[in-house]
Image (cartoon, rainbow, N blue to C red):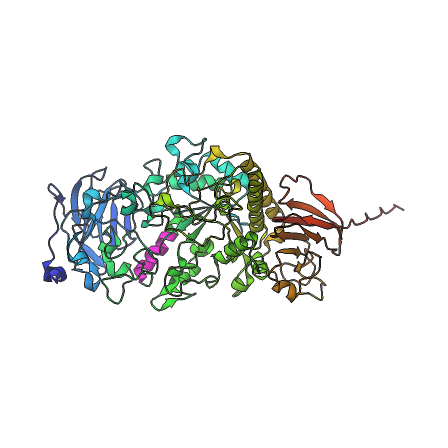
């Protein structure tokens, strides 16, 4: 190995751009807050690096094209390099060059020839241009990442911009929707508005596009309570995608945790994000961000040097026993080291920034098991999870975990701390398998419909901790789930080898679109079945944008790189079936919000209460009898009735409840099943609100006790008990 690679003093010197002014006007400044902070008189710059030997602040012209000044930060306090420029102001464009040892075998990859992004930058400008100069080592060298590259990366790098954070918020307060009333709508900021006819072309695909009146009215009228946006943090388009003329559409490739993605800004002003949030709040809609704190866009040891790697590789990343290499629990090449106090601080500072300054209402954490990992493995009370739980700001927003990662012991559904909700993939798989008609699914289905108490009912957690979903951005849309047996990801350029193969999907006779009326009718009924199941289950429902009118991605179940018509919502292509499905979805959502028994705050138990003479939930056979162990174990049983008794007290108090009583019948058989409507004390008949075989049912139809209802194959029904009319009290005669 070349000694120059491993010796700090002999590392090749940085390249100094000509005509770059060096200055001594910098003052000491403060080691806090981290980042670039304008105080009305100047800007304080502070950046953490435990292992650097020198840090230089590089100032650029307004467009970030030409470096005009280089300032060495004069002070080093508590592993923070800092300095104050008295005449700097918002709009200043900057980056860093960080000196230190280039010793990959010791975990250090400092290279001052590489311009670095400030981890705390609030705004990035320009585009990343893939070039060999972006790498700290020399591409093609026989020494690979042990070599050292002397080229200046600044011409190809994005730059940071100092921002003015002041913003006048509208009169609207945060909606503060209770968890039990929450209905989450997962969508993509860009894809949702790129083809919306009411959005001006210059605003499509941006924060300004999502704040348009017609867009917000649509979301509001649908009835959902929160939009969950796929990542809007600044991210990178992977080089291999750029070579194929594709983009990182989903955005799970973060490089800045405080800055929004530049392409989502229609204006040069960072406050565009706050305007969008303000408009959604004014409509009573919460905003949840999908955030990626588990890895960065710098990849493994052969990745580029863009920020964290060049600032302090050994601190920011989890390194393998051989520190030249990275622990890869994420499957993306690196893993952020949340066991380091300063890295943990960066992530929690980022969350507080978005929660307090941008007034975001919640966060969904990608591969959240990573965030609970310590060097020895996952802890349900790990440092990050505890930090959020005790934080006065973060403990008050919605925290949602994707509770798995690619590392050992990575599947942790149900093991997150109290106060967290979790994506429930077991709900997704069970509902898909049941409606597909797989055998022996009734016991599992019963658990999933009742908020998965077997997983979440511990430590005082509530049913809302189970975030129920049938589809999400990753996988088939609901339309494609009933239209394709196989994935069709050829457009991704990976020979259809990417994406999941186990989709629990079924095409009902034809792969893809068809004009066959019987197949189309069955597919639409199955979509209605799964939408109704989702919205009538205990727990927190999450709906994928576009499923409400049968949006298709043409069978692509991994559209992460399809920033085009494959993924964008086709608003003008919604046909009559889509319009009718949209109205049906609105009806389902309205029923859920109007019937509190569908969203109880305590787990249903099915235990008989002798004092009240009632069960909160009873499972019935098609004959109207209570399910026996033999019924549950019958692999061919695919039809079940669920009786939710409104007389049961949802809070555990020993008195009768006052909710309505509901009966839901689910039939996944291929044939009609005759179901007897049970008799219930206090009622005189059943009123049918929903029959997925008759979605146009406007007025509830009435059926008497003991009525045998022919339940169509592949259908779901919801009945409400019509209570016995109480005689009016006689008027007292006056004396």
**Residue 217 placement (x, y as % from top left):** 51, 36
The residue closer to the viewer here, 77 or 572, is 572
Q: Residue at x 55, y 56 (%)?
A: 438
**Residue 648 placement (x, y as % from top left):** 67, 59
The residue closer to the viewer here, 456 or 561, is 561
**Secondary structure that dominates the magenta span:** helix
Tell me, yes or no, whether the highlighted magenta stretch contains residue 598: no
Snapshot quadrant of residue 3 = bottom left
Locate residue 551 relative to residue 517 in the image: left or right: left
Locate residue 324 relative to residue 514 in the image: left or right: left
Snapshot quadrant of residue 317 = bottom left
Locate residue 298 relative to residue 705 in the image: left or right: left
Magenta residues? Answer: 340-351
Spot the residue most to the bottom: 376
Q: Visible in this render: residue 424?
A: no
The residue closer to the viewer here, 231 or 276, is 231
Q: Residue at x 27, y 65 (%)?
A: 320
**Residue 403 placement (x, y as % from top left):** 43, 59
The quadrant the N terminus occupies is bottom left
Spot the residue most to the right: 735
Locate residue 60 relative to residue 673 in the image: left or right: left
**Residue 153 placement (x, y as % from top left):** 18, 46
The residue closer to the viewer here, 638 or 370, is 638
């Amino acid at each position: 190995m070349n000694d120059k690679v491993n010796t700090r003093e002999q590392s090749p010197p940085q390249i100094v751009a000509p005509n770059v002014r060096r200055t001594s006007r910098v003052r000491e400044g403060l080691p806090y807050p981290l980042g670039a902070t304008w105080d009305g008189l100047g800007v304080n710059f502070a950046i953490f690096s435990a292992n650097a030997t020198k840090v230089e602040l590089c100032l650029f012209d307004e467009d970030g094209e030409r470096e005009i000044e280089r300032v060495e930060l004069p002070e080093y306090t508590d592993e923070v390099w800092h300095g104050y420029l008295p005449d700097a102001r918002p709009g200043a464009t900057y980056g860093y060059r960080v000196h230190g040892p280039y010793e990959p075998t010791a975990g250090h990859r400092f290279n001052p020839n590489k311009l670095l992004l400030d981890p705390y930058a609030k705004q990035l400008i320009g585009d990343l241009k893939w070039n060999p100069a972006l790498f700290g080592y020399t591409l093609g060298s026989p020494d690979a990442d042990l070599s050292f590259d002397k080229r200046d990366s600044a011409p190809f790098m994005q730059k940071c911009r100092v921002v003015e954070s002041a913003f006048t918020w509208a009169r609207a307060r945060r909606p503060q929707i209770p968890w039990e009333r929450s209905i989450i709508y997962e969508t993509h900021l860009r894809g949702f508005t790129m083809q919306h006819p009411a959005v001006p072309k210059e605003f499509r695909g941006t924060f300004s596009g999502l704040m348009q009146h017609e867009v917000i009215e649509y979301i509001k009228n649908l009835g959902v309570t929160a939009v969950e946006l796929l990542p809007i943090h600044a991210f990178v388009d992977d080089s291999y995608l750029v070579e194929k003329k594709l983009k990182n559409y989903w955005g799970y490739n973060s490089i800045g945790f405080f800055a929004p993605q530049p392409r989502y800004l229609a204006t040069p002003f960072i406050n565009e994000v706050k305007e969008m949030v303000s408009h959604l709040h004014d409509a009573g809609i919460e905003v949840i961000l999908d955030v990626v704190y588990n890895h960065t866009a710098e990849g493994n040891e052969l990745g580029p040097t863009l920020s964290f790697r060049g600032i302090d590789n050994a601190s920011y990343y989890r390194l393998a026993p051989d520190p030249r290499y990275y622990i890869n629990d994420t499957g993306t090449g690196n893993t952020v080291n949340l066991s380091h106090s300063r890295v943990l601080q960066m992530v929690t500072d980022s969350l507080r920034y978005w929660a307090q300054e941008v007034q975001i209402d919640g966060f969904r954490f990608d591969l959240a098991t990573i965030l609970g990992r310590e060097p020895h493995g996952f802890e349900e009370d790990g440092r990050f999870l505890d930090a959020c739980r005790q934080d006065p700001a973060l403990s008050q927003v919605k925290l949602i975990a994707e509770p798995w990662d690619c590392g050992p012991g990575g599947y942790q559904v149900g093991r997150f701390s109290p106060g967290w909700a979790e994506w429930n993939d077991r709900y997704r798989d069970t509902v898909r398998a049941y409606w597909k008609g797989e055998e022996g699914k009734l016991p599992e289905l019963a658990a999933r419909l009742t908020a998965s108490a077997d997983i979440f009912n511990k430590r005082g957690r509530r049913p809302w901790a189970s975030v129920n979903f049938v589809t999400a951005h990753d996988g088939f849309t609901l339309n494609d789930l009933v239209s394709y047996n196989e994935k069709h990801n050829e457009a991704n350029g990976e020979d259809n080898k990417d994406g999941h193969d186990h989709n629990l999907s079924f095409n009902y006779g034809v792969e893809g679109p068809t004009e066959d009326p019987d197949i189309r009718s069955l597919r639409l009924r199955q979509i209605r079945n799964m939408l109704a199941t989702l919205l009538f289950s205990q727990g927190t429902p999450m709906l994928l944008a576009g499923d409400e009118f049968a949006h298709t991605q043409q069978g692509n179940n991994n559209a992460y790189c399809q920033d085009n018509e494959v993924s964008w919502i086709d608003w003008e292509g919604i046909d009559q079936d889509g319009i009718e499905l949209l109205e049906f979805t609105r009806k389902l959502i309205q029923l859920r919000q109007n019937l509190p028994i569908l969203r109880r705050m305590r787990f249903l138990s099915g235990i008989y209460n002798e004092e009240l003479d009632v069960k909160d939930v009873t499972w019935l056979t098609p004959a109207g009898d209570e399910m026996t162990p033999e019924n549950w174990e019958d692999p061919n049983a695919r039809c079940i009735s669920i009786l939710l008794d409104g007389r049961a007290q949802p809070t555990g108090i020993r008195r009768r409840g006052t909710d309505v009583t509901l009966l839901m019948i689910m039939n996944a058989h291929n044939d009609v099943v005759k179901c007897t409507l049970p008799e219930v004390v206090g009622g005189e008949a059943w009123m049918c609100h929903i029959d997925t075989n008759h979605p146009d049912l406007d007025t509830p139809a009435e059926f008497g006790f003991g009525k045998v209802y022919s339940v169509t194959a592949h259908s779901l029904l919801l009945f409400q008990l019509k209570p016995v009319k109480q005689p009016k009290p006689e008027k007292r005669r006056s004396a």
